[in-house]
């Protein structure tokens, strides 16, 4: 079992729909990243959070440390949101600074 | 603006050749990392460095080496390229913060094909 699990693996939506991607992890962490990767492109950090909630435009990320769970929400989805979304965690202890990644969620938004 | 750049973006090489992938960051970050991305495996850590002259092995380090002679650069060398090393390689950097590791910044990736 992976230390970081994402669901769903694939997600198809119509433009305008509300989207949720989930991330569960089994290790103690100091922080969590939500990353975005467009086809053939680089990786960009959308959020880094260690508690609560962060919002940027149509994107919202939440984390519940006690339940070891985080969610990424996209409101009013748009075709340009089509990408792979990756959850990555900073584990504690000797893993300091190293990221452990989920498998990614492939999001396709149709016009 | 500060950035992290990788070169080349695409590389085709032959089995057995030595290959070096470059990573250069202008964030002045102490922490630098090399990851490889493969279908079915996601991103996995190859090597990392917490500062000049410091290098450490990650979970998939066999066949790879790195050196850190300055803050800005962490080149990744494939000593004798193998077909199993065909992958997309990402370099990342981050900085220590008082309350934990800082935000990670990634390069654009290098697509390496070993034939």
Image (tube, coloured by chain):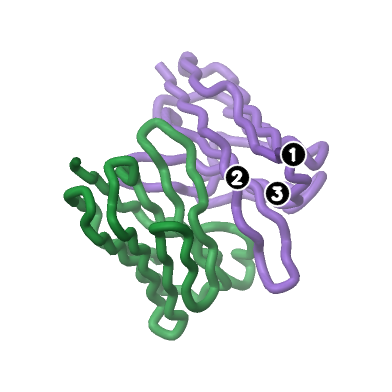
**The N terminus of chain A lies in quadrant:** bottom left
Relative depth, front residue between A1 and B100: B100
Foreground mark, 3 or 2, reads 2
Say whether residue B23 is left or right of residue B86: right
- Report the disc number at residue A46: none
Decide which of tag 1 and tag 2 comes sooner along the chain.
1
The colour of chain A is green
Q: How dense is the environment of label 3, judged by Cα within 10 Å: few (below 14), some, or many (20 and up)? A: many
Q: Cα distance, mark 3 to mark 2?
A: 11 Å
* Residue plotted at (74% across, 39% down): B26
Relative to A78, residue A89 above or below: below
* Residue plotted at (30% across, 62% down): A21
Residue A16 % position (x, y):
23, 53
**The C terminus of chain A lies in quadrant:** top left
Q: Which chain is purple?
A: B
Q: Which residue is mark 1?
A: B26
Badge 3 element = strand
Foreground mark, 1 or 3, reads 1
Q: How dense is the environment of label 2, judged by Cα within 10 Å: few (below 14), some, or many (20 and up)? A: many
* Residue plotted at (57% across, 43% down): B106
Residue A40 % position (x, y):
39, 31
Foreground mark, 1 or 2, reads 1
Q: Which residue is mark 2?
A: B92
Q: How dense is the environment of label 1, judged by Cα within 10 Å: few (below 14), some, or many (20 and up)? A: some
Q: Which residue is mark 3?
A: B49
Q: Is residue A66 visible?
A: yes
* Residue plotted at (70% across, 49% down): B49
């Amino acid at each position: 079992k992976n230390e970081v699990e994402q669901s769903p693996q694939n997600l198809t939506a119509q433009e305008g729909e509300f989207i949720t991607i989930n991330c569960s992890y089994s290790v103690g962490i100091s922080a969590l990243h939500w990353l975005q990767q467009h086809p053939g492109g680089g990786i960009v950090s959308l959020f880094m959070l260690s508690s609560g909630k962060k919002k940027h435009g149509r994107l919202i990320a939440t984390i519940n440390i006690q339940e070891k769970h985080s969610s990424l929400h996209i409101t009013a989805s748009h075709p340009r949101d089509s990408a792979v979304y990756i959850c990555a965690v900073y584990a504690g202890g000797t893993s300091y600074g190293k990221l452990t990644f989920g498998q990614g969620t492939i999001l396709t938004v149709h016009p | 603006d500060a950035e992290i750049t990788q070169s080349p973006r695409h590389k085709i090489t032959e089995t057995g050749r030595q290959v070096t992938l470059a990573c250069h960051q202008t964030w002045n970050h102490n922490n630098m990392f090399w990851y490889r991305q493969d279908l079915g495996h996601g991103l996995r850590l190859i090597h990392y460095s917490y500062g000049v002259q410091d290098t450490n092995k990650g979970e998939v380090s066999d066949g790879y080496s790195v050196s850190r002679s300055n803050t800005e650069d962490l080149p990744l060398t494939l000593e004798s390229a193998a077909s199993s090393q065909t992958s997309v390689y990402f370099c990342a950097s981050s900085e220590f913060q008082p309350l934990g590791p800082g935000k990670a910044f990634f390069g654009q990736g290098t697509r390496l094909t070993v034939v």
